[in-house]
Every structure is written in C-alpha cells, then in structure tokens.
Amino acid sequence: MMPDGTPLGDSNIGGIPLRAWFEALNERIRQHAGRDARNLQIGHSYLMQAGSPIKEIAPLKRAIRDDIIPPLEEYCYENYGTLKEILGKELVDVAKQRVRHELFDDGQEETLVQGLLSEFSSILASTEALLSDESSTATNEDDGDEDEE
C-alpha cells in the first residue's frame, strides 16, 4: 500500500500545510533514496494522533525527530548528502555529517518551520494559489450577495 496524504486533509501547523509537505517529502524520497525508494516512503500515520492529523507543533516535532528522520537516515545509509536532498540543507549539516537536532528544541519552532519549508517552496506556492483561489471565490460570492440586496 502506497502512502496516502488524503487523511491529513487541509491541516496546517505553524504555516506548514501538512498534506502538501508529506507528499513533497515522499516525492523527494522517491527521487533520492535509490532503487527501492518507492517502498521506503513515509506513511501518513506518523502525522496522525488518535485518528486525526496532528494539530500542534510539539507532536509534529516529535514525529519528525523520532519517527521520520531515523528511518530516513537508515535508508540513506548515513549518506548525509542524500539525506540533505530529502530533508533539506536547513535540517542536515553535511559538513558535520549530522541532522541538526537542535532545531527540535523548545523555542526553535519558528526556525524549524522555516527549515522544513525552505526546501519545499513548491508546497508554499501551491498553498498560496489555493488560498488565493478560495479568497477570490469568497469575494465573488460576497459580490453576488450585495447584488441581491
């Protein structure tokens, strides 16, 4: 069974569109984790709590730090160059051959969010486009209401 982002819906944590980030992460795994990459993708259950998408930054930090990064390190055979291609340069220090775990410390949430999004600019663009489309639809609906009065 392949990963399915549908259960994550439109959850947004600290500016991270969870489903879009999850799908972009799995795309990067498929691109960079070698010939078995399709079978190494991350499942949506890591980003769920009690049957619903994670809603707060603390459980998201734990899920990424404790459940997502360790298998990715293993899939990459501790090749931090490959790991950087998957997670991004903000989370992986290739020169020191390590994940920047300090980003998961309390008080570093904004830096972590920026790091998680920095390499995934396409999800921001698609989210902004979606929000723009929703905004224009709402504006058009509002305009229609004014004509009826």
Image (cartoon, helix red, strand yellow):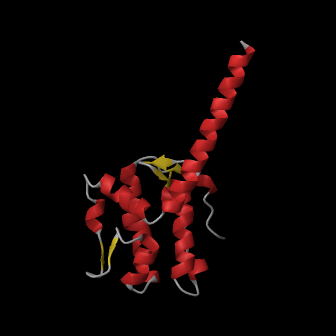
Across and down, in percent, residue 114 comes to 37, 57
Across and down, in percent, residue 32 comes to 51, 81
Residue 38 visible from this viewpoint: yes
Q: Is residue 84 above or below residue 103?
A: below
| Extreme residue toward the right, this view | 148
How many dots with numbers? Answer: 0
Asked which quadrant contains residue 84, the reply is: bottom left
* The N terminus lies in quadrant: bottom right
Taking depth in this image into account, of 16 and 54 the one nearest to the observer is: 16
Across and down, in percent, residue 14 comes to 41, 48
Residue 45 visible from this viewpoint: no
Name the residue at 61% across, 78% down. 38
Name the residue at 63% across, 55% down. 6
Q: Is residue 48 above or below residue 138?
A: below
Asked which quadrant contains residue 4, the reply is: bottom right
**Drawn side of residue 59 relative to residue 43, left or right:** left
Taking depth in this image into account, of 14 and 118 the one nearest to the observer is: 118
Q: Is residue 98 above or below residue 6?
A: below
**Drawn side of residue 124 relative to residue 136, left or right:** left
* The C terminus lies in quadrant: top right
Name the residue at 65% across, 25% down. 142
| Extreme residue toward the top, this view | 149
Across and down, in percent, residue 21 comes to 51, 60
Name the residue at 64% across, 32% down. 138
